Amino acid sequence: MPELANDNPSFVLHGIEDVKYEDRPVPEISGEQVLVQIVKTGICGSDVHYLEHGRIGNFVLEKPMCLGHESSGIVAKLGPDVKSSSGLKEGMRVALEPGVSCRVCGACKSGAYELCQHMSFAATPPTIYGTLARYYVLPADLCHPIPDSVSFEDGAMIEPLSVGVHSVSTLGQCKSNYTVVVFGCGPVGLLCMAVAKALGARRVIAVDINQERLEFAKNYAATDIYIPSKRNQDEDSDVYAARASEELRTELGIPALGRGAIDLAIDATGAPSCIAMSLHLLKPAGTFVAVGMGANLNIPVSFFQMITKQLRLVGSFRYGQGDYEFAISLVERGLVDLKPLATHRYSFKDALEAFEATKKGKGADGKAVIKCLIDAPQ
């Protein structure tokens, strides 16, 4: 275990398109806190959104904030009250679960701590801390040990994989033999497909408008891929959703009812047309899980489909109890392979280049970006 450094280089957002490298103090720890030395950090679409817009919904940047929340690292120091039962030791490799709930509200006590209204989440206002730094502090129970077979890059991607676990397994209750459709082939959509495949889904159908992303999905976790036809001029949105859904069923040979019908629909886009198609595609008593946040969060829903098919509609926010442990287990056992998603790598000094590549969807090499990973400060 290397000696503790006396500086904490950080990648800090000051405003829209205004980021600076700053040397922040090395955090002090107390009680059951753990000081983690960051090794790898992945760039999430939300990080880019804060850079471009300074806000996501009601989370508004009001003071300088260190970016980054998808990270792995090494336990650098344990607080005085960290219990031996935590299993943590200095030098241990960990994946960071970057949201600290209040632990005393009704949501926390019921086990749904992801719904805590007092959550302090890395790189999300009003917090000023993120993981694109040398050091980060977390309670011991949010530092999840990763086995030697799980690389630091894999460890950083446990965060978005846990989003997929929460959406598909915890909330979507995906079972072996399910037919699952996933809208959106970005990182979260791909990981939702990977989780569905790992759980034994009969078919995993990827829907997107980008052929290159669909081909990646087919090679990664999807059994079927599909590009919906375009909406006709002046065509009602629900009429279009019904038509496009029927075209998908016909082309892929998916029944509306019975064996092989769509049990679970995951939307990782936030696009109104994708949400509408999901409701039309689902079989009666099917489940729809919304995990993607689009530009427009006020979306009309076909209540006719929801009511007459008695659909179960669920919103999915981050991850909760047991999701991280399950995600690590999937990777450790080889049921989910995260390595193909790590398409571009950057040094800490080139962090802004990683953000630009994520924003554009292509790196300087001209290759499509799935996930950019940034090394910690040297």
Image: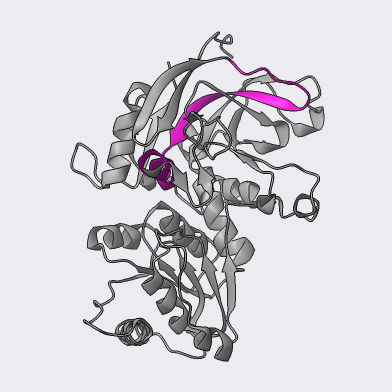
On screen, residue 196 above or below 249: above
The quadrant holding residue 13 is top left
Does residue 373 appear to the left or right of 115 in the view shown?
left
Q: How is the image coloured?
A: one colour
Residue placed at 60% from the left, 63% from the top?
Answer: 169
| Screen quadrant of the N terminus | top right
On screen, residue 77 above or below 53: above
Does residue 349 appear to the left or right of 365 in the view shown?
right
Residue placed at 29% from the left, 58% from the top?
Answer: 213
Place of residue 225 in the rendered image (x, y in percent of width and height, measured from the top left): 32, 70
Does residue 43 appear to the left or right of 129 in the view shown?
left
Place of residue 190 in the rendered image (x, y in percent of width and height, measured from the top left): 41, 57
Q: Which residues are magenta?
A: 26-52
Place of residue 321 in the rendered image (x, y in percent of width and height, measured from the top left): 70, 51
Residue extending farthest to the left is: 366
Q: Nearer the viewer, residue 337 or 318?
A: 318
Q: Nearer the viewer, residue 1 or 231?
A: 231
- Is residue 83 something one can see in this rendering? yes
Does residue 354 appear to the left or right of 136 in the view shown?
left
- Is residue 175 something one can see in this rendering? no
Q: Nearer the viewer, residue 353 or 178?
A: 353
The quadrant holding residue 378 is top left
Residue extending farthest to the front is: 62
Q: Is residue 58 magenta?
A: no
On screen, residue 207 above or below 360: below
Place of residue 238 in the rendered image (x, y in percent of width and height, measured from the top left): 38, 84
Residue placed at 70% from the left, 32% from the top?
Answer: 139
Q: Nearer the viewer, residue 153 or 284?
A: 284
Total marks shown come to: 0
